[in-house]
Amino acid sequence: MYDKYYSILDSNPSDNIKLIRKKYLKLALKFHPDKNPNHNNKFNEISEAYHIISSIHPSDDNNSNILSSSPIDLLREMLSNYDNDLADVMYDTLSTLIPNTKNERDLWKQIINIPKNELIKTGANLIKQYLDRKCNYNSHNKYNLYLNSNELKDENNIECSLDFLKKYSSIQLFINNNSISTFDLKYQNISIKYDNTIYDFNFIDKFIHPFKRINTYDILLELSNIPISFINNIISISHPFLKNEKLNLSFFISSTSNIYIFNNLGIWNPTINNYSNIYLSLSFISSNNNTHEFINITDDYMYIQPDKILNICDLFNS
């Protein structure tokens, strides 16, 4: 009964829904009326076939979330066959122009109806960003990752430590010794096409607790349970940071609501051709105890001092 719909999508009932979806997106891009105005009926046929198949095709637990992907997630999938840097800047551009949409038809409609003047204005910026990325890859170390095709999985996890991200700004992927793609390490996940198959790569930050990434490249360190008695004192902080290195900071605390910013101490940020910033946030408790695991009261500015201090209240009011 549904064989003709599977045939339209170049699929069969034994395919999982994730593979069917990828084939649908490929066909939809190929026969989209904006690209091929003479194939409007073919595009409608493809859309109808996928709508029917996605409603009746069984999905396992691992792929059930595919059907509920947001249009913005679909945009990522549609760009998965492009050069990764080009796909990234296209995504950044299109996602700002496309409002929240309810389904794929809305997504196509929004893309088609983007005003030409907006496309012209953003197109030049898109090209500039793309060229900047390619140039920035040469400004810092690139890690060569060699994989054999038999090692590839549908989902491939790459763990990135702070040590790694301070040393490298990108990953050059080789499969069977063939150069495939370059990944900017701002990515959380990316998809590549190899030998007619789509593979997902997930970049997972493996930082020493409680460091975490913010603002794409900046690093946040949140320290808690600091005695309130530390206020109005000079403190020194010595916290595990890299594999064989501690982060040593020193400054005067005058408030419980400040964020301290230390420039150029974080991971490599190719957009500024320098290291990113570290944001330090402190949480206090009502205690007169003058001890803390990572902080000491001192009489001198022993270590690196903050380049900027932000008051949280001013931050929210700005």
Image: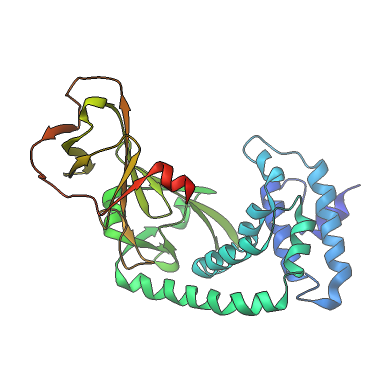
Q: In terms of depth relative to the viewer, which is nearer, 51 or 184? A: 184
Q: Is residue 165 left or right of residue 104?
A: left
Q: Is residue 88 left or right of residue 102?
A: left
The answer, for residue 133, to whether it is visible in the render is yes
Colour pattern of the rendering: rainbow
Residue 255 place in picture, x, y as percent:
29, 37
Residue at point 64%, 80% (across, down): 120
Rendered image quadrant of residue 143: bottom left
Give the vertical position of 142 relative to 150 (above or below): below
Residue at point 42%, 46% (across, down): 314
The answer, for residue 175, to whether it is visible in the render is no
Rendered image quadrant of residue 60: top right
The number of callouts visible is 0
Q: Is residue 240 left or right of residue 106?
A: left
Give the vertical position of 56 relative to 51 (above or below): above
Rendered image quadrant of residue 138: bottom left
Give the vertical position of 149 relative to 52 (above or below): below
Q: In terms of depth relative to the viewer, which is nearer, 233 or 188? A: 233
Residue 311 place in picture, x, y as percent:
36, 44
Residue at point 29%, 67% (across, down): 140
Residue 148 place in picture, x, y as percent:
42, 57
Q: In terms of depth relative to the viewer, which is nearer, 121 or 54? A: 121
Q: In terms of depth relative to the viewer, which is nearer, 153 or 237? A: 237
Residue 144 place in picture, x, y as percent:
34, 63
Q: Is residue 246 left or right of residue 15?
A: left
